[in-house]
Amino acid sequence: AHREALEEEKQQQLKKQSASASKMGTGTAANWGGTSNDNRASVFVKWLIQMFSLPWLCSGVGVLDVAGGSGQVAWNLTCIRRCPSIIVDPRPAVINAKQRAYLRRS
């Protein structure tokens, strides 16, 4: 019963977000709440945490990032949020200068 209630709550949240996204327009930035591509990974991680909660995402072995591209989502989850994540992508992850500096400090 508890699991069904949680699932129903998630479905209601998705409907609300879908409705608000459709009101915002059809462009890429509009779909991300007016966010530029520069920080879309951060916005996506915030959405994941709102939808599923950080403890739930970190449970088990963490988050599997399929087609993770440059690795920004996995970086945000692992280094910023301390939630384990694994990237599956044929290309190597890209670590920029800010990330290198962050790793040196930690």
Image (cartoon, grey):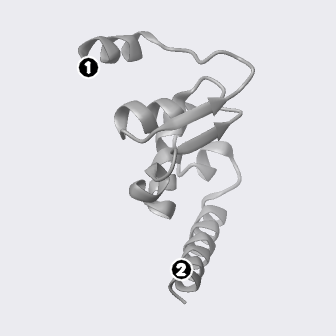
The residue at the point 53 percent across, 29 percent down is 72
Quarter of the image that includes the C terminus: top left
- The answer to whether residue 101 shows anywhere in this view is yes
Q: Residue 79 or 35: which is nearer the viewer?
A: 79
Q: Position of residue 77 (x, y in %)?
A: 45, 39
Q: Position of residue 60 (x, y in %)?
A: 50, 51
- Amino acid type, mark 1: Ser
Label 1 residue SS: loop
- Residue located at (29% from left, 11% from top): 104
| 34 left or right of 26 in image | left
- Residue position for label 1: 106
Task: Decide: few, some or many residues near mark 1? Use Cα within 10 Å; few <14, some 14-19, many ≥20.
Answer: few
SS for callout 2: helix
* 2 vs 1, front mark: 1
Q: Nearer the viewer, residue 27 or 16?
A: 16
Residue type at the position of mark 2: Glu
Q: Position of residue 89 (x, y in %)?
A: 71, 26
Q: Looking at the image, which residue sits at the far bottom?
A: 1
Q: Which residue is mark 2?
A: 9
